[in-house]
Amino acid sequence: MQTISSELRRRFDNANSVLVLTGAGVSAESGVPTFRGGGNTAVWKGMPFNVISSARMVGRDLPAVWEWFDYRRSLLGTLAPNPAHYEIASWQDRFPDFTLVTQNIDGLHQQAGSKNVIELHGNIWRARCINCHARYDISNGDSRRSECVSCGDRLRPDVVLFGEMLPPGIFEQAADSARDCELCFVVGTSGIVYPAAGLPEIAKAAGAYLCEVNPERTALSGLCHEVLTGQAGEILPMLGH
Ligand code: BV8
């Protein structure tokens, strides 16, 4: 069973500013399929996910992109946060300066009570107009609208697709918090997708103590001062209690 080092325990119990970066792995125990893991890459109708989830695909076949995200919304609609989400949510009241940055679009952190979540890659429960960028909440399960009320143009998922820039200012906001944190947790991410995977490097360069939580080695393990090998839903509660 993984143990928490006295070094990490001391830093955790005395930290003021903490940043947590999460990926698909933090939602795995809720039943959300990860993109990689076990050596496989998620595939949809024969297309690797970073093809169907790409800017080019929106231009080429928007209905196919919607089908992919409609399928994921239907799956997510049946799932709930797990102990990892709830533990992380409790940290916002524990540390004077706490920042949660996620690559996940599933909204499970917010469902667990996390506030001010920095969503680097958008949110699956929102749509936005391709033309005027008006945003729409599509979490009420009814049939999703397809046209924009104000300009009539088509809607697309309000997520960041491969080859697309992150929403203006979002990465800078996360990078600022990474530069100020004393303790940075990297939870459930393979650390392959940029610029998200660059955040722990920014934190470390600014003197933060890096701790990874993941059942497998990742592209970021070598960068971390401490690696806790296991499931986030089992390991994170060990820290808080
Ligand atoms: C951009 C939304 C400017 C959509 C997503 C630098 C170098 C190389 C390439 C690039 C680079 N800079 C930019 C690029 C291109 C690209 C990129 O990074 N490509 C990768 C594939 C190499 N980046 C972009 O396109 C970004 N935009 O850079 O714009 C630009 C523009 C044009 C050209 C150049 C630059 C936009 C990236 C965002 C794309 N959208 N999501 C959707 O969801 O469909 S990315 C999506 O994939 C997720 O959001 C996440 O970011 C990523 C998946 O990674 P993870 O979340 O880490 O999940 P994964 O399955 O990989 O790993 C899960 C981990 O959990 C595993 O380690 C596993 O062991 C662990 N785990 C499993 N169970 C548990 C667990 N851990 C803990 N507990 C458990 N129980």
Image (tube, grey):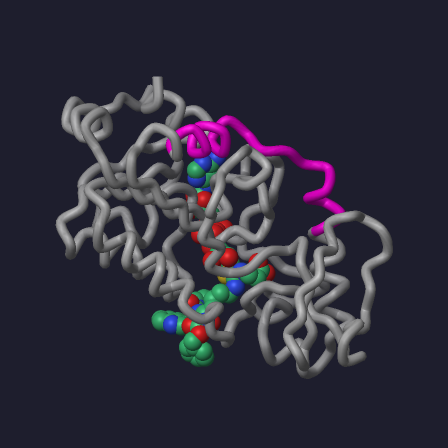
Is residue 185 at all visible to an observer of this figure? yes
Image: 172 above or below 109: below
Residue extending farthest to the right is 143
Indicate the quadrant where residue 187 lies. top left
The answer to which of 6 and 219 lies nearer the viewer is: 6
Q: Quadrant of the N terminus?
A: top left
Q: Is residue 126 left or right of residue 94?
A: right
The picture quadrant where one finds residue 124 is bottom right
Residue visible at 56% across and 69% down? 161
Image position of 99 with respect to 202: above or below? above
* On screen, residue 90 above or below 111: above
In this rendering, position of residue 177 left or right of residue 62 = left
> Percent from the top left, x then y, of residue 139?
73, 50
Q: Position of residue 121 (x, y in %)?
A: 51, 60
Q: Position of residue 106 (x, y in %)?
A: 60, 48
Residue beneath the point at 62% across and 64% down: 158
If the image is split into quadrants, where does the C terminus sit? Answer: top left
Q: Residue at x 71, y 56 (%)?
A: 137
Q: Is residue 39 visible?
A: no
* Residue 206 percent coordinates (x, y): 15, 54
Q: Residue furthest front?
A: 150
Q: Main secondary structure of the magenta part?
A: helix
Outermost top residue: 241
Q: Which residues are magenta?
A: 73-91
Name the residue located 48 percent from the left edge and 68 percent from the top edge.
Answer: 167
User: Residue 199 magenta-drawn?
Assistant: no
Numbered-mark total: 0
Q: Is residue 78 magenta?
A: yes
Residue 160 against residue 226 in the figure, above or below: below
